[in-house]
Image (cartoon, rainbow, N blue to C red):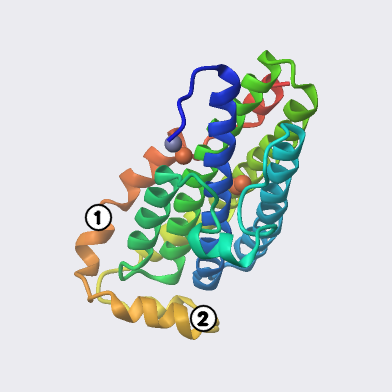
Amino acid sequence: MPTIETLHALLKHELKDLFSAETQIVDALPQMIDMTNNNELKESLKDHLEVTKKQRDRLNEIQDLLGEEKMGSANQGFFANLFKSNEGEEHCKAMEGLIKEGKSLLNEDMSFEVMDAAIIAAAQKIEHYEISSYGTARAYALQLQLKDIAGLLEITLREEYDANDSLTALALSKVNLKADEFANLPVGSNKNSIRKTPPKRSAKAVKQVKKAAPKNISSKKTGSKTKNSNTKRSNQTKSSKKSKARK
Ligand code: FE
Ligand code: ZN
Ligand code: FE
Ligand code: FE
């Protein structure tokens, strides 16, 4: 593990960490997309998957500008691939944790409507981590007068803000509402009946839901209102003001 003695070295470390984070997101998003019920949410996540792949390429572009070897497997030979993961030299443990936590939440037994709300929650935690890391990296680049690099990091930072904002919009306009409607059906009614046509789910997603042991549904619903209002105050706050301020 090389020593980090300068801000420049710290920037390099942050970029490698981000490369690992983006790689892990590229690997994890397809599964989340599979489990999504709401079409708008599905499209938004699919878009962000494509954006994420470009962000990873952009990190390699930055690495080029720094005169460093490219990160990750895309440009490495067979033997390099054999010994290195496709994440490069760093492994972002925070992203590993965020993804693990998200996956274990999504493996709970929940209705499709509540599942969509949980997917947004997991995705927004990921976006917030990225916003924080890209914001930091960009600040370092500006301090170090690396204007081109700061500019590239700014592009990604904006994309992460946009992804977070569209998730907030979807949560507040539709997904949280549907999840709450589901919870408010009278006890004992057939909760599946509120759905006119059964949503399509991939075999993988169905298997994952089945894997989770059946839980007492009524006890789980009790806390959902408090949880929703908490979410509105913290994660799902409109960040448009903040986005303007950061310019
Ligand atoms: Fe990203
Ligand atoms: Zn490290
Ligand atoms: Fe990290
Ligand atoms: Fe992102």
Estimate the x, y position of residue 81 in percent, counting from the top left.
Answer: 56, 63
Instruction: Give above or below for 142 relative to 154.
Output: above
Give above or below for 128 relative to 166: above
Compared with 190, 215 (above or below) is above
Nearest to the observer: residue 12 or residue 183: 12
Residue drawn 38% across and 62% down?
A: 103
Q: Residues within 10 Å of mark 2 (few under 14, many from 20)?
A: some
* Mark 1 → mark 2, Cα distance in angstroms: 27 Å
Circle nearer the viewer, 1 or 2: 2
Indicate which disc, 1 or 2, sits on the residue closer to the N terminus: 2
The answer to whether one can see residue 172 in this image is: no
Give me the disc on residue 222: 1
Q: Identify the residue at image location x=57%, y=59%.
A: 80
Quarter placement of the N terminus: top left
The amino acid type, in three-letter code, at marker 2 is: Arg
**Mark 2 highlights which residue?**
201
**In the picture provided, is 105 more to the left or to the right than 176?**
left
Quarter the C terminus occupies: top right
Place of residue 201 in the rendered image (x, y in percent of width and height, measured from the top left): 51, 81
